Amino acid sequence: MTPAKTDRPHPRIRTAIRSAAVFGALCVLAAAWLLLVSTRGALDEERAFRAAVGCAADGDGDGDDDCLRTVAARIDRTERETGRKTPRYRLYVVEADGTTHRTHLKGSPQDHPVARAGAGVEVTYWRGRIRYVDIASVRRYTTADPRGDYKIFCAAGLALGVYGTVFLWCGFWSTKVSHASVRMNTWQIGVPVSGGLGLAAIGAVAPFPTDSPGAAFRLVALSVPVVVAVCSVAALILRRRQRGDDTIALTPSVPDRERCFPGLIVSEASHTGTGGYLVAGPGVLASTVDPTGASFRHEVSPGLTPIRVRPPYWTDPVRADYGGRSLVLECEDEGVRVLVVTHRKHMPRVLGALQTMGRERKVRR
C-alpha cells in the first residue's frame, strides 16, 4: 500500500520547497542587515561613548556633540512605569535655569531611596540625551546607555541567520528526500530542523554572556559539533525505526460509549474530507461538523474495511496535522480507498469502533 516512488516531487512538496526557500532567504537577508548594519552601528556608538571625554568649560553646552556635558540639577519627581516585565521608573530633573528633563532608570524608586524629590543630582548628557545620573555619589546609568545595545541586534541576527539557513537546507534536501519518502514527518527533515532550532536558540542567547560579537560567534561555532553529534545519534535511531514498512501496530480500544474528537474521513473517489470531528462508539463510526457529535452525522458504510495504520503522506488528498501527532487509517469500501485521519491517541478508538461494526455484520448474517 506504500505509494510508488517517483523522480519528481509531489506538487505539495514542490510548494513546500518553494515556501521554505523564500522564507529562508528572507530570514538570511534580515539577519545580514541586523549583523552588518544594526550591530555595527550599535558597536560604533558604544565605542564613541566609551571614548567620550568631558566638554570644555567654555563649550556651548548644547549637549548635541560627542563630549560629556555634566550639569547640576535637582529631582522634581519620580513616576513608576507600570505594565512592564522589567521594572523601571521615570526621573524628572530640574536644572538651575528651570528647564525640566526626563529620563528612565531601571528598577523602582523604592530601590533607590536617595532618588526623592528635592534631592540634588548631577546628570550627564551625550549627544543630546541623559546617559547617566550621579545620585548621592552613586552613578546610575539610564536606559539610554548605549553600552551593550549591540547584543539584542546580534542575538536576533544570529538566531534569524541560523533559522533561515535551516529552511534553505530543508528546501534543498527535500528535493532529494521527496524521491525516497512521501512521509510528512520524515527524520531526514525533522532531525535537521530540530538541530537547527537548537542552534538558533543558542545564537539567540550567545551575545549576552559574552563581551563581543566575535565571542558570541565563537560560542555558536563551538556548539555546532555538539548539535551535529546529537542529531547524528537521533538520525541513526530514527532511521532504524523508520526502515522498511511504515505500518504502525495499534491495539483497538473498543469504546464503552460514544466519544467525539477531531478527525476527518477522506474518500479517494472525491478527494474531499468530511466533517472535522469523528464520533466513535460501540458499532458506530461517523463524521460530523458538530463538535458535540450530536447532529449532522454521516456514518461510514457498513462495508468499510480497515487495512493498516500509517503516518500521513504528502500525497494524501487532505492533510490534518494535529500538532504533528496525526495518524492515517487506510480502509477500503467496495474497492474505493478511504482514509480516516485523527490524532494518534484517538486512533485505537476508531479501530475499536470498526471492529464492533464488523462483529455486528457477522451477527446479522
Image: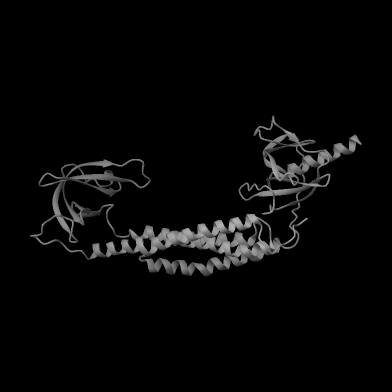
Pick out the residue farthest to the top.
295
Which residue occupies the foreground of this view, 276 or 197?
A: 276
* Residue appearing at x 26%, y 52% in the figure: 142
Q: Is residue 92 left or right of residue 272?
A: left
Residue 191 in sight from this viewpoint: yes
Pick out the residue farthest to the left.
58
Q: Position of residue 15 (x, y in %)?
A: 60, 55
Instruction: Tell me which corner region of the image, top left, top right, bottom left or bottom right, holds residue 61.
Output: bottom left
* Residue appearing at x 42%, y 58% in the figure: 156
Q: How many numbered marks are there?
A: 0
Residue 205 in sight from this viewpoint: no
Q: Position of residue 101 (x, y in %)?
A: 19, 46
- Residue 282 vs 23, above or below: the answer is above
* Residue appearing at x 64%, y 56% in the figure: 11
Which residue occupies the foreground of this view, 276 or 76?
A: 276
Q: Position of residue 32 (x, y in %)?
A: 41, 63
Coloration of the structure image:
one colour
- Residue 42 vs 115, above or below: the answer is below
Which residue occupies the foreground of this view, 126 or 331?
A: 331
Q: Quadrant of the N terminus?
A: bottom right
Q: Position of residue 87 (x, y in %)?
A: 33, 46
Q: Quadrant of the C terminus?
A: top right
* Residue appearing at x 63%, y 54% in the figure: 12
